[in-house]
């Protein structure tokens, strides 16, 4: 996984990123067969452009810069960043997020990003972005995407997502949720501020569950069956939360697009984590986070296919009070050593 550093205005950041990832962006386009996706893009583009210009103009500028730096048509970068989702979800896109709001190492967010088997995974990148007008941030995404919803900023706000789905219709008039989260990490200096940002507008996207943790110990889960957004709070007195690939709020339990059998593994992971950590058990420090991200069982958190379905692609940890992020590319049980970035 490359670490790309980019500073300046939005267009300059895009150009630096595009130039650094020219080959990898093309690899991603081939992997997802981008040229076959959204054949009606030209019909959607006028409204999508108006939405981007109205709500997140700097994200549009950055995408324009990325296309220039990568020497690709702007449409290619736009289709990567504003995708259309069909009626079925990829069963391999299953990720696990864990939050500790307090402990010996302060508040911590951790995540394993899971996907297809080696050889069928999109090329990932860690981007350390210092935009002139915003809080610096480190985000983890796939090459060509400005962001997923995995990021950590210099104020100690960390957020990570798990794909879930949404039964609700999507509108080109609504801001793309991944780009809205990316913009939020530039704008927001606390977890509470980030949550207000995310819930301020209706969003467009697949539908996600996320964990948010900040340096003060604020912690919650955002459950976002786009265009809706709801907040799930920790249990009273609890210093741990998780999210996986289902909505845990009762009101949203059927707001995804997963049949019951499609949620068995996600629910089992959440229940295993509850048994490990709920009520003060299991530790709340960096070592406890590393250990659980490398955990093997049935279900596992470090996932190698077979009964785990997905494969872990990379792992991320945010030490919120220290403003330090850690990440590794590959199975955490095998790689072991994390790259550290001080924001």
Image: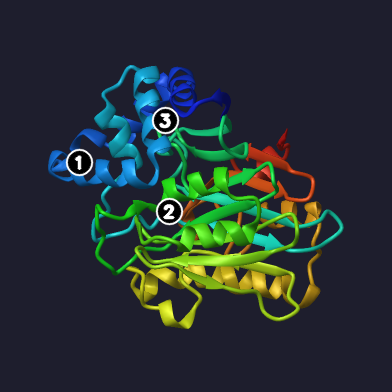
Mark seen at residue 62: 3
Q: Distance between the Cα atoms at labels 1 and 2? A: 27 Å
The answer to whether marks 1 and 3 mark residues whose Cβ atoms lie closer than 8 Å is no
Question: Helix or strand or loop: what does disc 2 sit on?
Answer: loop
Q: Few, some or many C-alpha atoms within 10 Å of disc 3 (few <14, some 14-19, many ≥20)?
A: many
Q: Residue at x 64, y 43 (%)?
A: 153
**Crowd rating for badge 1 (residues with CA inside 10 Å; few <14, some 14–19, many 20+):** some
Marked residue nearer the N-terminal end (1 or 3) = 1
Q: Residue 110: x percent and y percent?
A: 65, 53
- Side (left or right) of 215 relative to 65: right
Q: CA distance from mark 1 to mark 3?
A: 17 Å
x, y percent for residue 312: 54, 48
Give the residue at x 51% y 56%. Answer: 161
Which residue bears the numbered disc 1? Answer: 45
Front in this rendered view, residue 263 or 240: 240
Where, by quadrant of the figure, is residue 216 drawn? bottom right
* Residue at figure coordinates x 33%, y 17% from the top left: 71
Mark 2 Cα within 10 Å, few/some/many (few <14, many 20+)?
A: some
Question: Which residue is identified by label 2?
Answer: 93
Q: Is residue 67 above or below residue 44?
A: above
Please tell me whether mark 2 or mark 3 is closer to you in this view: 3
Q: Secondary structure at mark 1?
A: helix
Q: Position of residue 264 (x, y in %)?
A: 46, 72
Is residue 298 visible in the rendered structure shown here? no
**On screen, residue 23 above or below 171:** above
Task: Give the alpha-carbon distance from disc 2 to disc 3, as whole Å.
Answer: 26 Å
Name of the residue lying farthest toward the right: 104
């Amino acid at each position: 996984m490359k670490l790309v550093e980019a500073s300046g205005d939005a267009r300059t950041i895009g150009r630096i990123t595009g130039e650094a990832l020219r080959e990898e962006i093309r690899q991603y386009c081939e992997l997802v067969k981008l040229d076959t996706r959204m054949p009606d893009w030209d019909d959607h583009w006028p409204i999508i452009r108006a939405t981007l210009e109205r709500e997140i103009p700097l994200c549009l500028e950055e995408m324009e810069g990325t296309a220039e730096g990568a020497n690709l048509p702007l449409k290619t970068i736009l289709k990567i960043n504003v995708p259309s989702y069909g009626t079925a979800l990829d069963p391999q896109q299953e990720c696990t997020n864990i939050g500790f709001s307090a402990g010996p190492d302060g508040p911590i967010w951790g995540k394993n990003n899971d996907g297809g088997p080696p050889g069928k995974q999109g090329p990932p990148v860690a981007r350390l972005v210092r935009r002139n007008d915003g809080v610096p941030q480190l985000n983890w995404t796939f090459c060509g995407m400005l962001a997923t919803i995995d990021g950590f900023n210099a104020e100690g706000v960390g957020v990570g997502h798990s794909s879930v789905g949404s039964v609700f219709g999507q509108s080109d008039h609504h801001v793309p949720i991944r780009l809205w989260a990316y913009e939020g990490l530039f704008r927001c200096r606390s977890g509470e501020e980030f949550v207000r940002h995310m819930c301020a507008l209706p969003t467009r996207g697949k539908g996600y569950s996320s964990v948010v943790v900040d340096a003060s110990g604020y912690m919650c889960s955002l459950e976002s069956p786009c265009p809706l957004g709801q907040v799930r709070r920790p249990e009273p007195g609890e210093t741990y939360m998780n999210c996986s690939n289902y909505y845990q709020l009762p009101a949203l339990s059927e707001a995804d697009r997963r049949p019951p059998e499609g949620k068995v593994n996600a629910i089992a992971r959440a229940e295993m984590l509850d048994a490990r950590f709920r009520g003060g058990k299991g530790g709340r420090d960096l070592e406890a986070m590393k250990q659980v991200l490398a955990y093997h069982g049935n279900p596992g958190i470090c996932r190698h296919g077979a009964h785990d379905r997905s494969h872990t692609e990379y792992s991320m940890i945010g030490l919120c009070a220290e403003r330090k992020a850690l990440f590794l590319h590959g199975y955490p049980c095998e790689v072991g050593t994390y790259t550290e970035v001080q924001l």
